[in-house]
């Protein structure tokens, strides 16, 4: 069973703390540009009280954390390239600014928040969030390369798709996954790129791996498996709290909510996690 280990929890916590600091500092930076830098003329002789913006920045940081969490920006491990995450971060920042504006102008204060400052804060916050997220992404990626591979994967299939999955897992160190076995699903000869010592039987041997506790995740690469057999494998994994994923195909027997993740450029379908997926049977997460 794949668990959320300490590294994933620490990565999520670090991202949340860094986001809060980036939003807080970004908003105060916008205040400085508007009132203190001298780049934008003031309409009044005196600038508004700074404590009003200080408290506003603190409340805004909490609001942004809620929005970022609702958009799944703290899910770990994260995969793919950083450029794939930029649109989501920009969209989350935009939603945060929009809700902050609604909240700010819904509260009657005198003087009101500067509209120019709020507009500037979108750019300052977005820039700082992207910077700190890029730094954290590189740190997570490099740290994961030197940590133990804790997620044991069994791939059902020995065809070209299985080879592609093998490469994709190798190129995603944040998943900290290693393939412990390829299981044949038919009589076709396995691909030459699959090591012979990792071909450890057929699909009927999967139950033995699960019973011995040698697998945390099952990936179905051979999409020619009958639907009835796929359903049996899915239920076997569910009963033993083993993650089940399949390369997308017409598979209509899944009766639970489906979640798609990307491993490199390979899309995988899986069942949404249960709360018990974050607890080891008979013990806690490492």
Image: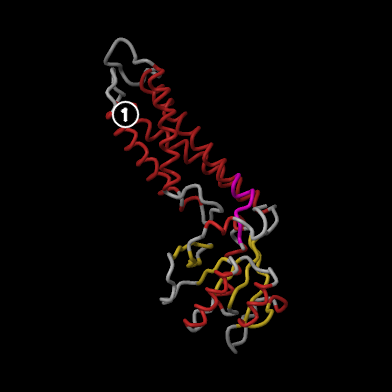
Q: Nearer the viewer, residue 198 or 194?
A: 198
Q: Is residue 280 left or right of residue 256?
A: right
State the residue at coordinates (41%, 30%).
59
Image-quadrant location for residue 123: top left
Residue 79: percent from the left, percent from the top?
53, 56
Q: Is residue 261 left or right of residue 48?
A: right
Asked if 100 appears above or below 280 in the picture, the reply is above
Q: Is residue 4 magenta?
A: yes
Asked if 148 appears above or below 181 in the picture, the reply is above
Image-quadrant location for residue 166: bottom right
Q: Is residue 248 left or right of residue 208?
A: left
Which residue corresponds to mark 1?
Answer: 104
Mark 1, residues whose alpha carbon is within 10 Å: few (<14), some, or many (≥20)?
Answer: some
Q: Nearer the viewer, residue 207 or 12?
A: 207
Asked if 227 appears above or below 118 in the picture, the reply is below
Outermost right residue: 197
Colouring: secondary structure
State the residue at coordinates (65%, 53%).
284
In the picture, which quadrant includes the N terminus? bottom right
Outermost top residue: 45
State the residue at coordinates (58%, 45%).
11
Outermost front residue: 282
Start-end of magenta stretch:
2-10
Residue 90: percent from the left, percent from the top?
40, 44
Residue 282: percent from the left, percent from the top?
67, 59
The number of callouts visible is 1
Residue 252: percent from the left, percent from the top?
41, 76
Q: Is residue 3 magenta?
A: yes
Secondary structure beneath dot 1 equals helix
């Amino acid at each position: 069973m794949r668990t959320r280990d300490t590294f994933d929890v620490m990565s999520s916590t670090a991202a949340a703390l860094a986001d809060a600091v980036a939003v807080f500092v970004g908003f105060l930076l916008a205040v400085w540009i508007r009132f203190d830098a001298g780049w934008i003329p003031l309409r009044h002789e005196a600038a508004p009280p700074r404590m009003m913006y200080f408290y506003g920045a603190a409340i805004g940081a909490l609001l942004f954390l809620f929005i970022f969490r609702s958009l799944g920006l703290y899910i770990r491990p994260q995969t793919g390239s950083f450029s794939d995450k930029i649109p989501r971060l920009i969209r989350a920042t935009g939603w945060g600014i929009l809700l902050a504006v609604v909240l700010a102008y819904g509260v009657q204060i005198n003087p009101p928040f500067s509209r120019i400052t709020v507009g500037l804060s979108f750019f300052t916050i977005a820039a700082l969030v992207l910077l700190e997220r890029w730094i954290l992404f590189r740190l997570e990626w490099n740290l994961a390369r030197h940590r133990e591979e804790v997620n044991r994967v069994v791939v059902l299939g020995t065809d070209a798709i299985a080879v592609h999955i093998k490469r994709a897992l190798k190129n995603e160190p944040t998943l900290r996954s290693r393939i412990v076995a390829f299981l044949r699903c038919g009589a076709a000869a396995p691909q030459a790129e699959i090591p012979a010592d990792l071909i450890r039987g057929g699909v009927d041997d999967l139950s033995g791996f699960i019973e011995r506790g040698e697998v945390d995740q099952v990936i179905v690469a051979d999409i020619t498996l009958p639907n009835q057999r796929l359903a049996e494998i899915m239920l076997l994994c569910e009963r033993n709290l083993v993650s089940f994923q399949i390369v997308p195909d017409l598979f209509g027997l899944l009766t639970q909510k489906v979640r798609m993740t990307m491993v490199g450029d390979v899309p995988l379908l899986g069942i949404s996690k249960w709360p018990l997926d974050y607890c080891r049977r008979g013990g806690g997460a490492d």
